[in-house]
Image (cartoon, rainbow, N blue to C red):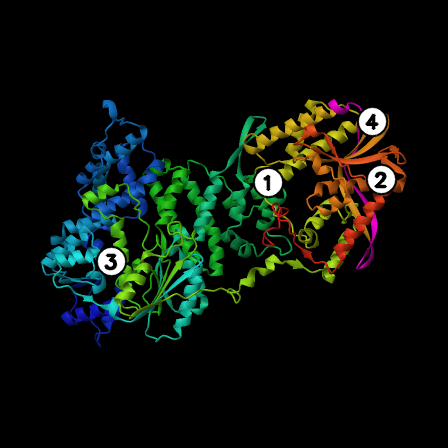
Amino acid sequence: MSFLSQVATHIFQRHETRMDNVWVIVPTRRAVSTFQQHLSQHADTPFLSPHVLAVDDFIMQSAGVLLIDPVSLLFELFEVFREIDESLEFGRFLNWASVLLTDFDRIDQYMISPSELFSYMTAAKALERWRLELPDGRTPKLETVGTQRYFKLFENLQTAYEALHERLLAKGWAYRGMAYRLLADQIEELVRDNPAYEKLYFVGFNALSRSEEQIVKTLVKAQKAEMLWDTDTYYMQSKRQEAGKMLRSYKAAGWSGPWTWEEKLLTDSPKHIQVIGVPNASMQAKVASQIYQQRAGSEPDTDTTALILGDETLLLPVLYSLGGSVTELNVTMGLSLQNSNLFTLIDALFEMQRTVAAFQKKDGSGTVFIPKFNHRHVVKVLNHPFIRQYEQTGLSTSSAASPRIIQKTIATITTDNLVYLDEKQLLAMGENDPLFQVLFRRWPDDKPLVVIRQFYALIDVLKEVYTRQQDAIETEYLYLFQNLLRQLETTLEREQRNELVTIKSLKQFLYELIRQTSIPFESEGGSALQVMGMLETRALDFDHLIILSVNEGILPQSRKLNSLIPFDACVEVGLPTYQDQESVMSYHFYRLLQRAKQVSLLYVTSADAYGTSKGEKSRLIRQIEHELVPASGGRVTISYPTVRFGQAADKKTALLPFDTLEIPKSEAILAKLRNDLMGKFNPSKNRVFGGIYPTSLNNFMSCSLKYYFSRVINMPEDDEVSDDMDAAEFGQWIHNTLEALDQEHRMIGEVVTTELVIEKLKIKYEETFVNRVTESGMNRLLYRVAEDLMVRFNSLQIERYGTTLEVLQTEEEWDTELEVETSMGPLRIRIAGKIDRVERIRQPDGSMLIRVADYKTGKIEARDADVRTMELLLSDAQKDKARQLWLYQYLVYKKMLQNKGLQFGNEWIDGTTTKVVAGFYSFRNLEGGFMENKLYLGTPEEFVSQTEGHLRKIIADLFDPTQPFQKTSDKKICEWCDYRKLCGR
């Protein structure tokens, strides 16, 4: 028999059907409906139910006050403190107001003397307790800004406490603890001597606050009330068991009369407990669903199951895991607005507005500051599930042929590297869609009502979508948030309080209200499955328990109290501490186990799942293992099932594919290679695409799997927008500047001065990085670095070569074709490469030397270019830079031999006597000068012939179907590879 069934029998036997003025007070509203169901089974004819109330409802009703809403309470407290200190800012007040109100609530519930407590906490008392002793007769320095502010707050607490009580009582309002104190102080006239209260039963309580204790004691002494306890011998007779700490003291005091009831269920009734460790917090939901469904069919129809969440943020994962397979369940707990998708959208909007940057722009009237949003926050908002849902539903009427505006906007931001975007840009990208008008309007800092109305507009836009989708939970969240905004708007408008609130303090205020707001899932049904938090289980019993997050730091919670009252002050005046919290939670846990038959305790094994638990199972599990199971004499059994996911979860070979990852060359892949490497002319671009380039050649030779990812399936690297330029962008900027200097000045015979270099560098920066902040941060530093490098490079060129160096060509693509015998027959493969600069040097003997130069903004040493043998060039995967020079040199020699010379603009260079070399200019090693590749293969004809022989072999291997694409064994190559995660590196 369950406890509430036992209570119903007891009360019915006393009063039968005459219960008009009988009051039954239980811990929760869920217990109210359960008790009424049990009571109704005791008579065949209808009768008037007793007054059955949750304890909070009983207190408010009996005290004759209204519960004040959180918004009004905060502002009432602020008004109190403004009378004490007119300079108090609302934002600073919000930093500690909610904690202080919680402390006031505790002070009232435990009927603490405000004067005793607050005087104990003053500066003088604190210094007396510290007993500071300094050598040489020196006195401690008492006054600092921090200590002044700290002690001034506590000096005013009693005044604020008393003034708040006066303000609320004048309006007939009270907060929860205040109502408890009011009733305790007037219990005789309000309840004891009131004929409407014939008999009161206080059912299933364990740790009474001082106000509750005074209420109950007064009524019990007057023989108007009876306490009905739910306790077990296991923790009542053992002083070691913290679950019975408070109850043992009540029983010993004897004020509640005969102890009704104490049973011996924990050790004497058979029960099986299974302890299950799972890898992460959300996975518990899946396991819990599986446990319930496995047992649902095997249990009697009368059996009940409770799925209890130690961590209440798991409610949504649990509901989604149960899915459509469980049609009958009751949820008896609140779904917090703070844990909703809607809150993450609100948070993203506040963060986007907080990080707005002001850009200067000069027009006819002077300097104008244009606020711009950071791309990260814009993309985060646009990628939010709520916004994506709007895109799927709200924009479904748009033309299917055109990309949806949200996707298009994100793509534009990424491809154009738009780091900062102003309101006008975003509205244009969004084609003035109502959603974009709501999301990307700049919020004024001093007009909170404008922000609230923007949120109204957002709700109106999203409400239509979720109503159409019939998503009950998300629609309820929108409704809750709208009500909260209305409440806040009304409070701000009252007495013109909006002028006190900035955007920052509005955010603090709104977040505090959101933290306190939840969807109240409360059900009257008697479904077999109940989903609830630990506090909602008070006085209820279940045959089967599934308890989640039984981790140390969660059940029981970590040892901390969010309070302004120090621990020693709590002990001194009799306020509860974390030790009392732990004993209360321990009682709830063991009381649940008393009548249960099957218990499943789930905990998380990963160290980072809960910051406080480090993946450690709760002490409650340890107590069961080492104390309860031995004490039961075999009636309580325990097991440790192992959770596996997937069919091969227990096979060690599951990781093998990563270690031997190979991609065979199918006919489709070979056909793709042929089409790609033979090259194809694009008329619209008027150029040929495809072929073997130095980068793709290096990819294949260093790691053929990397070649597969980058060229065969064309898997792009992650394209991200960055505030700071990365190494590739820095290099591109330098290349663009050098190209402009060469083409526009050096190649037409003009002298390039330092001033010209600085000017051109700035122009190219502004062209390349339109939306970057250049006045500060890393970009500013990199700009100075680039300026220094370019000026030094130009100076060294003039110093070393003077007029002997002539730029012939810059940033041009060279190519040739090579016939190769492959597994697919003979193919004409295009070999190509984009050469940064071709220059001509007049040597001291009067001969001319053609130099093929490649710019490197990273650091290059001479040894990186100087590879003197083909064996080393082709066998060492890390000689990629030297192979690049080798291929460039080959391309120039090949064209020179084919045409008997080279054409640069209007000038023809005879190829019979011209020598070609290839090398690097390293901008991180400018003193190294032109670092030449010293590979010598004989005459130009011999160079070309030997090179083509090696290229034919490499390309034949690329087409060889017996050689799959596979990852390299040299892990150094993988360090900076974009695909290393794909292959398990």
x and y, in percent, of residue 288 in the image: 41, 64
What's the amino acid at mark 1? Leu
Residue farthest bottom in this picture: 44
Residues under numbered marks 2 and 4 in contact, where contact means CB atoms less than 8 Å apart = no
The residue indicated by pointer 3 is 243
* Sooner in the amino-acid sequence: mark 3 or mark 2: 3
Quadrant of the frame with the N terminus: bottom left
Q: What residue type is labelled 2?
A: Gly
The residue located at (53%, 48%) in the rendering is 382
Q: Residue 843 carries which label?
A: 4
Check disc 1 and report its element: helix, strand or loop: loop
Q: Is residue 805 magenta?
A: yes
Q: How far from the left and from the top, in percent, is residue 876?
A: 70, 46
Please name the residue shown 62% across and 56% down the image. Answer: 400
Q: Give the Cα distance between marks 3 and 1.
A: 60 Å
Question: Which is more toward the observer, 326 or 456?
Answer: 326
| Residue found 47% across the figure and 45% down from its top | 348
Q: What stretch is highlighted in magenta?
A: 798-827
Q: Please, is residue 983 above or below residue 687 in the view?
A: below
